[in-house]
């Protein structure tokens, strides 16, 4: 399966997501955890995770691993390629579950088969907005498919393929990452304007200033500004149409249980598959 033409070599420079997550932790609060819990329970259609194991592939800040712990998962394992992301997740664990030996956090690479073979299989495998940043998305998807137990669930989110627009975003992201630190605002500010100003103006005209900004903050417990930086910096960058993801996992013995698409627009399509 090689649909995407928006690709980058596996070993090209990766955006340092961990630096962005460290800033996110500075504004971390209980509301964000609550929203992450809602996101998990609604998509997985599980009231809690009691008796279930949870693997967080590309854990980022560790927010959703924390949500899994709050949902009483039997055990949680979190890994990320980025050491600063690992550090962020460990900080959250130290804040909320400092003595829990059921939550393990470590550095790991979803493209490293030797590492993955040490993980075994899990009831729930979660990887939201991660695998399209590896530089080898289809291989990463192949790898996570082997981590799910029979009858287990896989919850992933993958960037939507917008055709030409996706190719333009690839150029924007590469440009951002190639710029020296002091010049990155030359790409970041126009991107923020492109993504948020039209929506803010529309909210103002409806006499509901910042409605979508406030609503976004309640989605998955994330931060709008952090996600803009995450979006423009997110490189390597690959995309896929929903039907391509569906067919890929159908061929590997999965059934689609739930899907949430962006309707052909910019963003992540979300999928929950069950392994037969």
Image: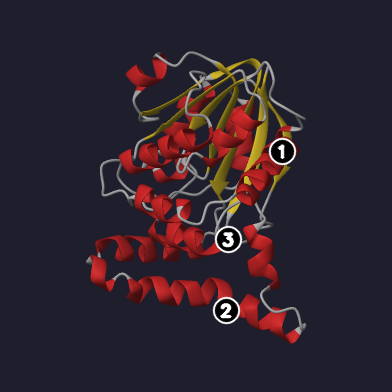
Q: Which mark is residue 43?
A: 1
Say which residue label 2 marks: 197
Residue 236, can we see it?
A: no
Q: Give me the C-alpha separation between circle 3 and circle 2.
A: 15 Å
Helix, strand or loop at label 2? It is: helix
In this picture, is 186 found above or below 19?
A: below
**Residue 93: x %, y % from top left:** 48, 33
**Residue 20: x %, y % from top left:** 40, 54
The colour mode here is secondary structure
Indicate which disc, 3 or 2, sits on the residue closer to the N terminus.
Answer: 2
Q: Which mark is residue 211?
A: none
Say which residue label 3 marks: 266
Q: Residue furthest left?
A: 180
Q: Residues within 10 Å of mark 1 (few under 14, many from 20)?
A: some
**Residue 234: x %, y % from top left:** 41, 54
Which residue shows up at 70% across the image and 83% down it? 204
Which residue shows up at 64% across the image and 61% down it? 216
Is mark 1 in CB contact (under 8 Å) with mark 3?
A: no
């Amino acid at each position: 399966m090689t649909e995407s033409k928006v690709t980058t070599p596996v070993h090209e420079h990766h955006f340092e997501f961990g630096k962005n997550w460290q800033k996110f932790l500075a504004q971390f609060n209980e509301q964000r955890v609550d929203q992450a819990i809602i996101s998990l329970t609604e998509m997985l259609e599980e009231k809690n995770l009691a008796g279930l194991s949870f693997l967080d592939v590309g854990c980022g800040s560790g927010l959703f691993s924390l949500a899994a712990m709050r949902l009483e998962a039997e055990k949680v394992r979190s890994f990320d390629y980025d050491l600063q992301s690992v550090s962020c997740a460990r900080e959250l664990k130290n804040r909320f579950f400092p003595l829990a030996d059921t939550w393990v956090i470590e550095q790991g690479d979803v493209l490293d088969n030797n590492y993955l073979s040490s993980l075994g299989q899990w009831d729930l495998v979660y990887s939201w907005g991660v695998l399209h940043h590896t530089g080898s998305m289809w291989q990463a998807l192949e790898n996570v498919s082997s981590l799910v137990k029979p009858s287990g669930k896989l919850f992933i989110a993958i960037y939507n393929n917008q055709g030409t627009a996706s190719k333009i975003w690839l150029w924007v992201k590469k440009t951002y990452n190639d710029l020296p630190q002091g010049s990155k605002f030359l790409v970041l500010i126009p991107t923020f304007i492109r993504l948020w100003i039209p929506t803010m103006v529309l909210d103002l005209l409806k006499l509901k200033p910042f409605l979508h900004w406030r609503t976004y903050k309640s989605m998955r417990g994330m931060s709008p500004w952090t996600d803009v930086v995450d979006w423009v910096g997110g490189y390597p960058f690959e995309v896929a149409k929903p039907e391509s993801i569906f067919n890929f996992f159908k061929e590997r013995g999965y059934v689609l249980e739930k899907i949430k698409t962006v309707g052909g627009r910019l963003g992540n399509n979300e999928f929950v598959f069950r392994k037969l």
